[in-house]
């Protein structure tokens, strides 16, 4: 199955976000900074792949949410705290990427939902 350019860009953004999060975590950064680094890297990667701002923001939100959820999970947080951390990080990253707070809120809800679903799985 060949990926569409959009899927490839999203995969690249996710990978960039994960790498940035891992690097920040390894450097002992606070969880908020780790999530922010993930979001920023994902957004830059998405932009480089030619994605527009809303798409970059989505990629950033997803990467930041994932990073925050992973950190919260590793810290032994409760599922609802993990979801909350993912949502908050996703919202911050999306807003930093330049989309409206309303859209950012949607991305936050999505990230929180995904984190909660993964916890439940």
Image (cartoon, rainbow, N blue to C red):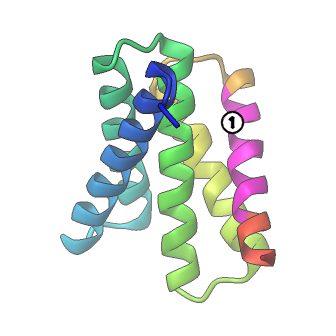
Tell me: 81 left or right of 95: right
Q: Residue furthest bottom?
A: 76
Reply yes or no: does residue 106 show up in magenta. Answer: yes
Helix or strand or loop: what does disc 1 sit on?
helix
Q: Position of residue 44 (x, y in %)?
A: 30, 27
Reply yes or no: does residue 105 show up in magenta. Answer: yes
Which residue is under mark 1?
107
Q: Main secondary structure of the magenta part?
A: helix
- 52, above or below 36, in the image: above
- 17, above or below 8, in the image: below
Q: Position of residue 19 (x, y in %)?
A: 28, 56
Residue drawn at (58%, 44%), measured in percent from left and top? 90
Residue drawn at (44%, 58%), measured in percent from left and top? 32
Q: Position of residue 24 (x, y in %)?
A: 25, 62
Quadrant where the C terminus sits is: bottom right
Q: 38 or 15: nearer the eye?
A: 15
Provide the residue span drawn in magenta. 104-115
Q: Position of residue 98 (x, y in %)?
A: 49, 18
- 75, above or below 25, in the image: below
Dot 1 alpha-carbon crowd within 10 angstroms: few under 14, some 14 to 19, many 20 or more: many
Q: Residue furthest front?
A: 1
């Amino acid at each position: 199955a060949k990926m569409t350019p959009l899927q490839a860009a999203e995969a690249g953004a996710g990978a960039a976000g994960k790498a940035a999060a891992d690097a920040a975590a390894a450097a002992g950064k606070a969880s908020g900074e780790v999530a922010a680094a993930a979001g920023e890297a994902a957004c830059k990667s998405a932009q480089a792949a030619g994605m527009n701002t809303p798409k970059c923001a989505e990629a950033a939100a997803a990467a930041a949410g994932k990073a925050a959820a992973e950190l919260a999970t590793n810290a032994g947080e409760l599922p609802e705290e993990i979801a909350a951390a993912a949502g908050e990080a996703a919202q911050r990253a999306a807003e930093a990427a330049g989309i409206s707070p309303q859209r950012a809120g949607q991305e936050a809800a999505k990230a929180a939902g995904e984190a909660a679903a993964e916890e439940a799985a």
